[in-house]
Image (cartoon, coloured by chain):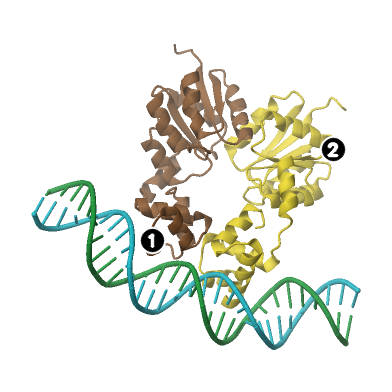
Chain colours: A brown, B yellow, C cyan, D green
Amino acid sequence: MSDALIRVLLADDQALVRGALAALLSLEPDLEVVAEVGRGDEVVDAARRTAPDVALLDVEMPGADGIAATAALAEAVPGCRVLVVTTFGRPGYLRRAMEAGASGFVVKDTPARQLAEAVRRVHAGLRVVDPSLAAETLVAGRSPLTARETDVLRAARDGGTVADLAAVVHLSEGTVRNHLSAAIGKTGARTRAEAVRIAEQNGWL
Amino acid sequence: MSDALIRVLLADDQALVRGALAALLSLEPDLEVVAEVGRGDEVVDAARRTAPDVALLDVEMPGADGIAATAALAEAVPGCRVLVVTTFGRPGYLRRAMEAGASGFVVKDTPARQLAEAVRRVHAGLRVVDPSLAAETLVAGRSPLTARETDVLRAARDGGTVADLAAVVHLSEGTVRNHLSAAIGKTGARTRAEAVRIAEQNGWL
DNA sequence: CAACATCCCTGACATTTGTCACGGTCGCCT
DNA sequence: AGGCGACCGTGACAAATGTCAGGGATGTTG
């Protein structure tokens, strides 16, 4: 049992990166890539079919993001541990990933040789977390934004006018302005656009 | 001469992706990764030292972006062909990369097995361009923004107020508003933030 | 139940923003 | 020289934005 191959599922929307990661992991004699998917909503199906030991999930994916896929996978295939990989070291991502049931969190800045080791640790039941990112997460704290404020701010990302946002979120125009004002205050920003940027950097959207 | 290994230089700021790409290319018997760098301003030095046949450059990099690195490399090491790889299929990126002297342009959505083939084609003197992206580039055309409009819009990315922008760009507040207004009109946007988003999506910043 | 927090909305206000018309400078091309 | 376009600035105006002080509805907690 201890000398069995570790079965790995790979999820990343960029085909080139996905294939490259597969090549990288296949160099390790004790790892075996048993599935590759490019969308978040294909993770659970593939995991059911291939019964992987570890799932390597990117956060930015179409269909369902890595956080949602983590939660779904933890419920549907509890025997499969999750290692989340992401481009951006947003503090909120780490927190939400761990709360969703992930066992590890790695940013794409980490040296390539450490990835296989991270997979092994996760498979062994250990937790793998980027230390500097963990520190950031503690100081950043959880999102101060309320649910509606998050909705409104998320809708404001593409730069529409207040009337547009109101139509999207199904709220009054004045209410939208109030939520925006609150979000601006809580983020310490001085403009709607700045509030969006700050919230995005912290992974609050 | 024809059976010699193709020497490849790899430039990507994400260490994990860089290492994974190296693993992927090393699977090919006729390719050899001779250098890996994580910053745009290290490309020329590494190329001088290792004399690669093909340089694989990411666009998003600290130090100097892939476009600037392409131009510098084309001048300093003319024997080395450049294949640009990027996450975002911004039309302007493709145009500027080709104008800077790149021989190929690939987005990270392309299947992994095609990368090695792209490297071989570039090495053989052919041009490699994502077809759908090439079409987009034709319809999008070159940036309609004037130099100052680009400056102002670039400064507006982090969401500051007009006074902030004026301080950064060293212009009058009214002039900044004029440039913003012009940029909004040219991009077809209805808000400053939307103009920023559109310009960014087209690679005009 | 009462206190509390969150959400939604209203209306009004000062500020900021986007637009327009105008004049002036500079460099480039015919 | 003259015309052209890009650049900088001014001033003024309507519209959008951000802020504030309220009120009502709901759910939670002591």
Residue under disc 1 on the same chain as residue under disc 2: no
Amino acid type, callout 2: Gly
Secondary structure under the numbered disc 2 in the rendered image: loop
Would residue B44 be seen by someone viewing this image from the given angle?
no
Position above or below: B154 against B80: below
Looking at the rendered image, the quarter that the C terminus of chain B falls into is bottom right
Q: CA distance from mark 1 to mark 2?
A: 60 Å
The residue shown at (59%, 40%) is B14
Looking at the image, which is closer to me, B28 or B97? B97
Q: Say whether marks 1 and 2 touch (CB < 8 Å).
A: no
Which residue is label 1 attached to?
A: A172
Would residue A44 be seen by someone viewing this image from the given angle?
yes
Residue B25 point in image, percent of width and height: 69, 29
Residue A172 point in image, percent of width and height: 38, 61
Looking at the image, which is closer to me, B112 or D11? D11
Q: Residues within 10 Å of mark 2 (few under 14, many from 20)?
A: few
Position above or below: A152 against B106: below
Position above or below: B64 against A194: above
Give the side of residue B59 with respect to residue B124, left or right: left
Q: Which mark is residue B125?
A: 2
The residue shown at (71%, 54%) is B140
Looking at the image, which is closer to me, C19 or B120? C19
Amino acid type, callout 1: Ser
Nearest to the eye among marks 1 and 2: give it: 1
Secondary structure under the numbered disc 1 in the rendered image: loop
Q: Which mark is residue B135?
A: none
- Toward which corner of the image does residue B192 lie, by quadrant? bottom right
The residue shown at (67%, 52%) is B64
Q: Residues within 10 Å of mark 1 (few under 14, many from 20)?
A: some
